[in-house]
């Protein structure tokens, strides 16, 4: 089994909350980590999810530390190389580094926007809502240009949980406790709108999320 980027393996994950005798749960945790499948965490139960989340946080911290170390090394190398250069040459080199960093930041921003919008397609009625409401700075673009799809999926799921009127319609159903019947996903219930501001309710109405409550036929 290969270690992850933080140097931890599934064996390093604290599974004490799961129970030493619950080997099946521990194996599920290892399988979910190895497969890098965010949906696999659902089979772990709350203790397993907490352990998996903790490991993800360690991985994220390790990646951040690695990037910081690389930056420091690059700065030291640049400073050493600058000793033998004239002030004008040093200024030119600094300008080049700044331009390269700006270009990389713009490229990473484009990658993030593209990945987030693609991940939101089919989950949000308007995928651009994810770009508007999520803090894109929480996501990282690796040196290889890859983004952690699991982090994005988790953020979108949390967004839908907090603002259900943003969800795309169709597919699964939810239960309307006020009427005692099933409603299509994306349609709001009376309980939902009690938690919303007037602006949010108006936006939901425009998006067709209140059609069931208003008695409109599809």
Image (cartoon, rainbow, N blue to C red):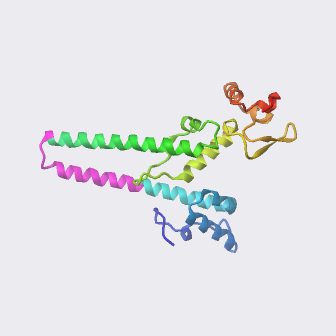
Verify whether residue 76 appears in magenta: yes
Position in image of residue 38 (x %, y %): 60, 57
* Count of numbered tags: 0
On the image, which quarter does residue 98 sit in? top left
Position in image of residue 149 (x %, y %): 54, 52
Position in image of residue 53 (x %, y %): 59, 57
Asked whether, in this view, residue 207 is left or right of residue 64, the answer is right
Position in image of residue 58 (x %, y %): 51, 58
Q: Is residue 152 above or below residue 42?
A: above
**The C terminus sits in image quarter:** top right
Asked whether, in this view, residue 102 is left or right of residue 203, the answer is left
Q: Is residue 29 above or below residue 67?
A: below
Q: Residue at x 53, y 40 (%)?
A: 135
On the image, which quarter does residue 183 sit in? top right
Asked whether, in this view, residue 141 is left or right of residue 40, the answer is left
Predominant secondary structure in magenta? Answer: helix
Asked whether, in this view, residue 126 is left or right of residue 172, the answer is left
Q: Is residue 64 above or below residue 168?
A: below
Verify whether residue 4 appears in magenta: no
Question: Which residue is more in the foreground, 73 or 154?
Answer: 154
Q: Residue at x 44, y 41 (%)?
A: 109
Q: Residue at x 55, y 60 (%)?
A: 55
Question: Which residue is more in the foreground, 36 or 64?
Answer: 36
> Magenta region: which residues?
65-88
Q: Residue at x 54, y 37 (%)?
A: 131
């Amino acid at each position: 089994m290969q270690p992850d980027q933080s140097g931890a393996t599934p064996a390093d994950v604290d599974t004490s909350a799961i129970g030493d005798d619950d080997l099946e749960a521990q194996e599920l945790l290892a399988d979910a980590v190895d497969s890098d499948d965010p949906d696999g965490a659902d089979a772990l139960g709350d203790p397993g999810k907490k352990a998996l989340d903790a490991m993800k946080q360690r991985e994220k911290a390790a990646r951040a530390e690695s990037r910081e170390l690389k930056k420091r090394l690059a700065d030291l190398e640049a400073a050493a190389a600058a000793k033998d250069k004239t002030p004008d040459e040093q200024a030119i080199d600094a300008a080049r580094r700044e331009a390269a960093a700006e270009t990389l930041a713009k490229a990473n921003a484009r990658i993030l926007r593209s990945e987030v919008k693609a991940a939101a397609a089919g989950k949000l009625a308007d995928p651009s809502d994810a770009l508007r409401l999520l803090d894109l700075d929480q996501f990282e673009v690796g040196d290889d240009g890859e983004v952690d799809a699991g982090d994005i999926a988790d953020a979108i799921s949390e967004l839908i949980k907090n603002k259900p009127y943003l969800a795309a319609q169709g597919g699964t159903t939810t239960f309307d406790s006020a009427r005692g019947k099933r409603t299509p996903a994306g349609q709001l219930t009376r309980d939902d709108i009690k938690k919303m501001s007037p602006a949010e309710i108006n936006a939901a109405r425009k998006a067709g999320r209140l059609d069931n409550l208003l008695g409109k036929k599809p």
